[in-house]
Image (spheres, grey):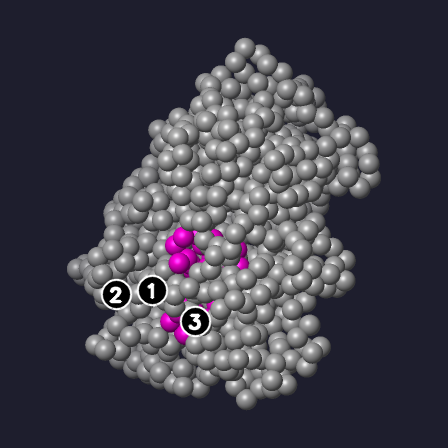
Amino acid sequence: MKKKIALITSVVLSLSLALTGCGSSTANSGKSGGAGGDKIKIGVAIPLTGAIAETGGTIKKAVELGAEQINQKGGINGKQVELVELDDKADPKEAAIVANKFASDSSIIGVVGHYTSSTTLAGAPIYNKAGLSHIAIGSTSPAVTNAGPFTYRDITTDAYDGEIVAKWTVDEGAKKIAILYENDDYGKGLADVYNKKVTSLGSQIVFQEPYNLGETKDFSAILTKLKAAGPDTIFIAGQYNEAAMILKQGKRLGISLPVFGSNGLYSDALIQLGGQEVEGLRAVGSFHRSADYPEAKAFIDAYKAKWGQEPDTWAAYAYDALNILFEAVKNGGEDRKKVNDYLTTLKDFKGATGTTTFDANGDCLKEPLKLIVKNGKFEIYKK
Amino acid sequence: MFWQQLVNGLTAGSMYALIALGYTMVYGILKIINFAHGDIFMVGAFLGLIIIKQFHLGFVPAFLLSMVIVAIIGIIIEKIAYRPLRKSTKLAPLLSALGVSIFLVNFAQLVWGTEVRSFPPSLQIDTFQVGSVTLSNIQIYALLISFALMLALHFFVHKTKMGVAMRATSHSINHARLMGINVDNIISLTFGIGSALAAAAGILIGLYYDAVYPVMGYTAGLKAFTAAVLGGIGSIPGAMLGGLLLGVVENLGAAYISMGYRDAIAFGLLIIILLLKPTGLLGKNIQQKV
Amino acid sequence: MNFKPNRFLPNRFLNGKLSLIGALLLILILPQVVASEYVMHVLITVGLYIILSLSLNLVSGYTGQLSIGHAAFYGIGAYVAALLMLRLNLSYWAVLPLAGLVTAAFGFILGLPTLRLQGDYLAIVTLGFGEIVRLVFLNWDKVTRGPMGLPGIPSPQIGDLVFMSKVPYFYLVMGMMLITLVFMIRVSESEMGLSLMAVSHDEVAAEAVGVNTLKAKLLAFTLSAFFAGIAGSFYATYISFISPDSFTFMDSITILAMVVLGGLASIPGVVIGAIVLGVAPEVLRFMADYRMLLYGALMVVMMIFKPDGFWGAKKRVYNVIRKNLEQKQLLHKRGESV
């Protein structure tokens, strides 16, 4: 039984060692930004690594710009804003961990994120339990609508966007359509809405198959199958990385059909990856650099001045989400409940992505733009 | 569609076979599973990409240069992470290999970033129509190069003095040493050749799917490992057969059953083969020593 | 059949009890002392890792069957628990044993190939099993919601008290950990433990001295899976969200690394391994991007300098077996019944 004694003492010792080690350091950091702190802390949950790290990078730039702007103006109610950025890797598991971290840090009074629908849905129960409001950025799945009273998004649901792309596809003369969708909340929801609308407009879905995000880069088998089904148009309900692979590998199998997509494809990274093969791809999106209203222009100019490059659509959504939270802190108050109370009443917030009004479910409606890839750039589509 | 899927499967399979050779050669001699092999393959793909993009060399010199560099990396890894463990328990080199694997992936993420990269469009894509099958030039290069490399390896192992020494070492390290073979050199050589083949596969796969990224070694490594076991681990022709078979079965499975279960089909096949014939298709039956 | 020399019993019993009480006290007090939720989270995770690595130790440590698919059991436990709670609205306490039992059944199934396969081949089968289980989670989306995972898994509840903060979770996982620990210590000192170690040492010899190796191996796999399933059910209710990504090959490897790094077939070793590898990524967090790079390098260095782990038990295990076998022979010579 010596073993047992040694064992338990070792457990005790190591646990206390581990404890004193981490305990002291976190206690300090807790003090500096604690409840009595003179800073307003906002959480930012975005994919900084992983399958869609590029998007996470532009979001990071946008929120840092937003924070810098407000701090230069003297902060909110005289207090400086501090962002706490955590990487959710676009992975629902990581998202739950990130959400737990934010939820348990009482100095954080609002969160921007998450980006993908699945990460938002993974985090939502945790935020809602903790009474912490979060504004999702790119999470367009219809399922987010019912995620809870503390879950908001400043982007339109796919239930709306999907129908608009569907109508557009059919208007362009598509009769037999093949759907490739990402097997998650975003892709599935979008594919369903799209399928229904297209069928109701009299065109036919000849092929519909899922692929798993990040699981494979080899689409040859699924594309061979798609080709055999004989479609005249392809609709991709997924992200730009996979879309670029699909188009490139499709070309090698002799597939060259018109391709439509939704806002997941609307990223400059699509063009960087896909090159020549994504020319002519059409997708909807809500923000474009040639937008002519003052809020968008101001954002684009400021972003360019700070980062030396043009913002993409997600940067704009993140920027708006952060500014909405600022509004809520300013007009509502500096705790979680007051922030949420204000958000439920948010009306006609004018930002880079247009006007945002939250409905009872924390959703909003914005008319998307029709876009096409022309000469290596997304341009506003003109027939 | 069947023929097209078959060709796709053979292309993927020929590249699995190239990676599988590294697993099988190392296992044949040291009886350890080199879990870092898939990541060596990834490093090969990145080096090829960088040599072409940053140093503006052509495909052929980039291909050869990457193979040489990765061979050296493989030899160094063996010297640092496996050689000191040759006499220890079986699990120690396995974990050491995993350590190397984690190190390489994170190294790649730090140096080359996490995002997917692609080869420059200077490598033109042409497609040909053969009956109902569409072939691309890249597919043909990939098939030709991997078969040429496999033939070269076969020739090397069976017709050269070094190859004989390698086979002898694989048969028994101690006996080989008694016969005057420098076992350490042979092991280095094995790692070098295996890694070079993995680098070749890395560039070919990177080109074929037009995607190079730090975690690409994980799936490819698992698949190639499966292929090696399927063919009979330790057997060089077995690895080739296993690779091709796996590629074909997988593609047909993806086409006729489900894309999502493609990998499950591969592993299911593996388990069945192991249960029916544990030594794989071409593996030698090893008597258990009592 | 009791090989234990009786004269040590009272003393040992007392010491064991004392240290157990000490540990219990510490566990009770800890949450009152630790203010940070984050540290509580790390401690809970470490507790979970201890259960997982102790359960794997039964198969890979004592019985010597290399398993690199342990995360599959962890995942099955988590999915069974989550699905029963979400779909049938069962309480966590009802689900907990069920998750363990269902997972144990899968453990039994995976144990079957061991009747034919050994060593690396068995390892590969466990790897294949692990991947297939994950792919089923991923693709059986009617039931598991595929890559979207299962969100909103309810918390356990005692009477009106719903688990909200980390404290009750901490007590729960520590309770589970202690039960697992005591069970594993009992097993290691029982006849069954000796049979398992005999199998790991030399299967043919074990069979020759009358160990039913078939039964021993199946039992090890089944029990090991049971505890992993329990751990999985806890994970599901604690994180409140599960997806196939939580149960990958890398997770299996992490658990195996804890067992090997700590010291195969050594309970204190395995516990230390779980603590060190559970805390290391958190402690290394200040390294930011270099964290995992260092982690990989440390693993290699560790293996080179201490290939038997922190608390290598290899030699000690054989000593125990030898001592026990000698005693057995001695008793036989004396003609006493065993």
Tell me the quadrant of the picture where the C terminus of chain A can be found: top right
Answer few, some or many: residues within 10 Å of disc 1's Cα (few below 14, many 20 plus, some between 14 and 19). Answer: many
Could you say where residue C14 lies in the image, as x and y percent from the top left? 29, 82
Residue under label 3:
A344
Residue under label 2:
C92
Residue A129: say if magenta: yes
Give A24 or A140, whichever is nearer the viewer: A140
Q: Amino acid at mark 3?
A: Thr
Which quadrant of the structure image shows residue C99? bottom left
Q: Is residue A349 left or right of residue C220?
A: right
Q: Is residue B41 left or right of residue C217?
A: right
Whole-angstrom CA distance, mark 2 to mark 1, is 8 Å
Could you say where residue A313 lies in the image, as x and y percent from the top left? 61, 54
Q: Amino acid at mark 1?
A: Thr
State if disc 1 and disc 2 touch (CB < 8 Å).
yes
Residue range (magenta):
A118-145
Mark 1 — on which chain does it sit?
A: C
Residue at the location (32% across, 54% down)? Answer: C79
Mark 3 — on which chain does it sit?
A: A
What secondary structure characterizes most of the magenta part? helix
Give A121 or C249, whichever is nearer the viewer: A121
Could you say where residue A323 lies in the image, as x and y percent from the top left? 59, 69
Could you say where residue A118 lies in the image, as x and y percent from the top left? 45, 54
